[in-house]
Image (spheres, helix red, strand yellow):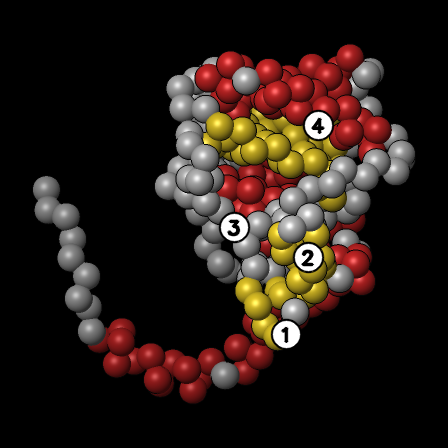
């Protein structure tokens, strides 16, 4: 059994890397073969939005296809990322943009367990860290079985709270048990798909995750209100057909665009002739 750790931080022995390593150590204790990738060690280029990958492999010459192959070869994945300005770092967002190339290959990853570790400097400033990290894995078909949000400013500061280490080890254990086929239910706060803890009210007692768009009911529990999302909608998102249908829709949009190309060219001409962009001199 193979477990792959992915670290989206440039810091060596930073908080994200430490907690990913702790999860991998627990997985190794349980008999897994473990490896890790530090994304900043590899070349990840910007997606060109050319859609060529919907019919063939991505044509961009960098390390992304290799990274995806390593993820496909693993039985489980642990993703660790810091929060930069209320979001994940650019390197992880750039890799997420390239996930489009995997929609037609979702069977390589589908249903495999994954864990998410997000580190933020201060409580209340985690922003969209957990949802955006989860989206990367969800859109590839992985099933997020554990999410860990930890706080620490300087590298290694998360170690001052033993609960962070305990939960990282728990993540590694849940990942292995899930990869073995065990039914492991871990209660996770927020949207069951992306982990967002915020929601929008769309009707009387009806709420919706503004990211995943799944609906649920607002219920009162323990003196406070919390959203309970539709299990049917959640299961729908956990089937490969959901992603394959979207890949088919994207192919259709490109074919439709080509049919309208001549009309669009005429409408775009005015903007081709107008060039307000500045160039750096020297």
Q: How dense is the environment of label 2, judged by Cα within 10 Å: few (below 14), some, or many (20 and up)?
A: few
Using the numbered discs, state the Cα–Cα distance from disc 2 to disc 4 in whole angstroms. Answer: 29 Å
Q: Are marks 1 and 2 in contact (CB under 8 Å)?
A: no
Nearest the camera: 10 or 61?
10
Which residue in the structure is indicated by mark 2? 220
Q: Are marks 4 and 3 in contact (CB under 8 Å)?
A: no
Badge number at residue 171: 4
Estimate the x, y position of residue 248 in percent, counting from the top left: 69, 67
Earlier residue among tags 1 and 3:
3
Estimate the x, y position of residue 174 in percent, counting from the top left: 78, 29
Point out the frontmost of discs 4 and 1: 1
- Name the secondary structure under disc 3: helix
Estimate the x, y position of residue 140 in percent, counting from the top left: 67, 48
Residue at 77% across, 24% down: 173
Q: Quadrant of residue 244?
A: bottom right
Q: Is residue 26 left or right of residue 198?
A: right
Using the numbered discs, state the Cα–Cα distance from disc 4 to disc 3 in whole angstroms. Answer: 26 Å
- Which image quadrant: the N terminus? top right
Q: How dense is the environment of label 3, judged by Cα within 10 Å: few (below 14), some, or many (20 and up)?
A: some
- Name the secondary structure under disc 2: strand
Earlier residue among tags 2 and 4:
4
Residue at 53% across, 77% down: 257
Estimate the x, y position of residue 31 in percent, counting from the top left: 82, 16
Which residue in the structure is indicated by mark 1? 204
Q: Are marks 4 and 1 in contact (CB under 8 Å)?
A: no
- Name the secondary structure under disc 4: helix
Point out the frontmost of discs 3 and 2: 2
- Which image quadrant: the C terminus? top left
Earlier residue among tags 3 and 2:
3
Using the numbered discs, state the Cα–Cα distance from disc 3 to disc 2 in whole angstroms. Answer: 38 Å
């Amino acid at each position: 059994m193979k477990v792959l750790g992915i670290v989206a931080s440039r810091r060596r022995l930073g908080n994200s890397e430490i907690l990913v390593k702790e999860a991998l150590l627990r997985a190794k204790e349980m008999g897994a073969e473990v490896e890790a990738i530090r994304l900043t060690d590899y070349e990840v280029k910007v997606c060109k939005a050319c859609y060529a990958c919907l019919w063939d492999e991505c044509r961009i010459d960098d390390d992304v296809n290799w990274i995806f192959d390593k993820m496909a070869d693993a039985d489980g994945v642990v993703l660790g990322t810091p929060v930069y300005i209320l979001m994940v770092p650019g390197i992880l967002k750039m890799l997420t943009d390239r996930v489009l190339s995997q929609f037609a290959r979702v069977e390589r990853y589908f249903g495999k367990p994954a864990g998410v570790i997000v580190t933020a400097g201060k409580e209340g400033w985690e922003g969209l860290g957990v949802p955006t990290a989860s989206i990367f894995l969800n859109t590839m078909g992985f099933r997020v079985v554990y999410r860990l949000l930890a706080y620490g400013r300087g590298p290694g500061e998360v170690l001052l709270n033993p609960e962070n280490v305990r939960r990282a080890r728990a993540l590694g254990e849940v990942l292995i048990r899930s990869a073995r086929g065990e039914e492991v239910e871990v209660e996770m706060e927020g949207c069951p798909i992306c982990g967002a803890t915020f929601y929008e009210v769309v009707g009387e007692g009806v709420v919706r995750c503004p990211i995943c768009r799944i609906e649920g009911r607002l219920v009162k529990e323990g003196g406070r209100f919390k959203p309970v999302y539709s299990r049917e909608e959640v299961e729908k998102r956990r089937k490969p057909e959901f992603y394959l249908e979207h890949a088919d829709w994207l192919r259709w949009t490109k074919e439709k665009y080509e049919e309208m190309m001549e009309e669009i060219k005429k409408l775009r001409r005015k903007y081709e002739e107008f060039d307000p962009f500045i160039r750096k001199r020297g």
